[in-house]
Image: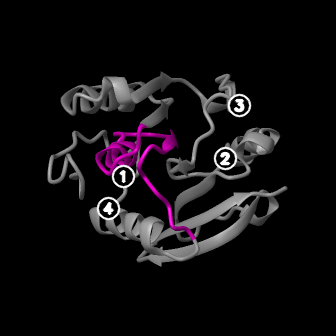
């Protein structure tokens, strides 16, 4: 896996065990970033943006955002082995000052969204949605500070979750078995 565009273009990432994480395939990642920037429904600007990458894995998504001009990424990872890979990638790309690495369960971490309002929140849960309801409840509790944030979820075909309970859907795209949904927290 590599960085697709920006200042780190073509640089390779270390990857965690594929049994633990579900990394975005390069062609899916490239399509997502094209959608973010060029879709009239999204028109996302990476310059000076703040990103929250929940279930970070290798950090591929967040590092790609930094490569394209994001000013800050908060990486959250709960798996020890994946977190070590994430730390190594952050060190290898020399972006310690542009990222905040948090080891732990997103549901138990206290984040002050009034101070760090992310422009984009990326969710790529590993294989099952067993805690996704609680993740969306936590995000919904902070909807005042997250109302302008784009929420982006990557999941596999066949995984069932009623996103419409928590999100106003903006766009949904399918890439083989991968599905990506863009939305905003319901008011």
Can residue 50 be spotted in the picture? yes
Residue 140 image label: none
Q: Kindly identify the residue that appears in the image at 64 percent across and 51 percent down.
A: 149
Nearest-to-viewer mark from 2 and 3: 3
Residue placed furthest toward the right: 187
Q: CA distance from mark 4 to mark 1?
A: 6 Å
Nearest-to-viewer mark from 2 and 4: 4
**Would residue 128 appear left or right of 87 to someone viewing this image?**
right
Give the mark, 3 or 4, whose residue is nearer the N terminus: 4
Kindly check if marks 4 and 1 are in contact, taking CB atoms under 8 A apart as contact: yes
Residue under pointer 4: 25
- Magenta region, residue range: 42-71
Instruction: Look at the numbered disc 1 and give the secondary structure of its residue.
Output: loop
Nearest-to-viewer mark from 3 and 1: 3
Residue under pointer 2: 130
Instruction: Look at the numbered disc 4 and give the secondary structure of its residue.
Output: loop
Comparing 145 with 17, the one in front is: 145
Residue under pointer 3: 114
Q: From the image, which quarter does the C terminus lie in?
A: bottom right
**Would residue 16 appear left or right of 10 to someone viewing this image?**
right
Kindly check if marks 3 and 4 are in contact, taking CB atoms under 8 A apart as contact: no
Kindly check if marks 1 and 2 are in contact, taking CB atoms under 8 A apart as contact: no
Residue 23 image label: 1
Q: Kindly identify the residue that appears in the image at 80 percent across and 43 percent down.
A: 144
Q: Residues within 10 Å of mark 3 (few under 14, many from 20)?
A: few
Occupied quadrant, residue 145: top right
Instruction: Look at the numbered disc 3 and give the secondary structure of its residue.
Output: loop
């Amino acid at each position: 896996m590599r960085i697709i565009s920006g200042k780190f273009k073509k640089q390779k990432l270390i990857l965690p065990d594929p049994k633990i994480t579900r990394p975005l395939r390069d062609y899916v990642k490239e399509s997502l970033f094209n959608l973010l920037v060029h879709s009239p429904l999204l028109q996302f600007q990476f310059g000076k943006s703040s990103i929250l990458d929940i279930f970070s894995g290798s950090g591929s998504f967040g590092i790609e955002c930094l490569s394209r001009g994001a000013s800050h990424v908060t990486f959250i990872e709960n798996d020890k082995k994946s977190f070590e890979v994430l730390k190594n990638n952050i060190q290898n790309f020399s972006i310690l000052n542009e990222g905040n690495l948090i080891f732990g369960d997103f549901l138990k971490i206290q984040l002050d969204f009034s101070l760090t309002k992310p422009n984009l929140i990326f969710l790529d849960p590993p294989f099952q949605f067993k805690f996704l309801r609680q993740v969306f409840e936590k995000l919904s509790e902070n909807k005042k500070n997250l109302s302008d944030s784009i929420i982006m979820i990557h999941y596999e075909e066949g995984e069932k979750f009623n996103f419409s309970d928590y999100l106003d859907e903006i766009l949904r795209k399918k890439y083989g078995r991968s599905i990506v949904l863009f939305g905003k927290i319901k008011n």
